[in-house]
Amino acid sequence: PYDILINSDDVNVKPTVQTLLKERYPDLANTNLYHEFHFANRLDYSTSGVLCVALHKKSCAAAVKAFETRTAKKYYLALLRGLLQNECINIDEPIGEDKRHKQDNHKMCVASNDNCEGAREASTRILILATGLFNGKDATKVLIKPCTGRRHQIRVHCQFIGHPIVGDYTYGSQEDKEPYRMFLHSYRLILPNAIEDVDVQAKDPFLETDPKN
């Protein structure tokens, strides 16, 4: 789900993905692990969708290696502000830390920003799926493939091209307060496997008619 932490050092913070997993699959919780489960990757607090949780240390190491070597394939769905003109967009813009926010939310920015520190290569591919209106304003539904895995990469690159994600307060000039969530969803994850690739999808939550808006 969206707006939920993966885990927390504070036992009073509930629910988290960790506590939900433990409630549903208590026999799989490993009390020898600090957070009881092998989380091979992470999602932003506001992002919903597919998350990789391994059953044991060996499989977790294999999954982590797939992410690090970029053999894992990740696909996201998002609603962006405005109408994109090109059906396919390739963004190759290094991303680094915004030095103005190092002490709070670790906000990121593109290398061309004067406040950017430690920029590293970042590549994102965007495919337009549909265009329309969200709460009476132009919006574009897209499929996104991040080719690298920088912090907040998709959100930063969408802001960079002038089409921030609907509901992204941090990268939407702190003006996008109206939507009930940030419209970014981890839709599909493909992990390489010697016998058969692991291919998992999470149902598209962004319906043509959103019952909450």
Image: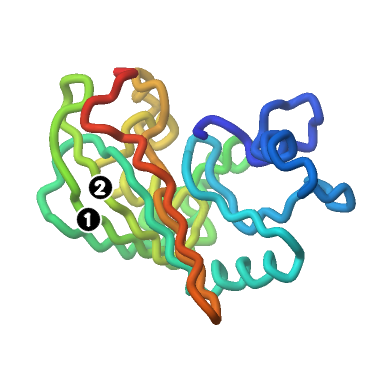
Residue lying furthest left = 85
Find residue 127 and name its label: 1
Local SS, label 2: strand
Which residue was labeled with disc 2? 142
Q: Position of residue 165 (x, y in %)?
A: 33, 38
**Left or right of residue 152, residue 141 in this image:** left
Q: Amino acid at mark 2?
A: Val
Disc 1 crowd, CA 10 A, few/some/many (<14, 14-19, 20+):
some
**Left or right of residue 80, residue 70 in this image:** right
Q: Amino acid at mark 1?
A: Leu
Seen at 19% across and 50% down, the residue is 128
**Left or right of residue 126, residue 94 in this image:** right
Q: Position of residue 42 (x, y in %)?
A: 58, 50
Q: Are marks 1 and 2 in contact (CB under 8 Å)?
A: yes
Marked residue nearer the N-terminal end (1 or 2): 1
Choose top left, top right, bottom left or bottom right for residue 155: top left
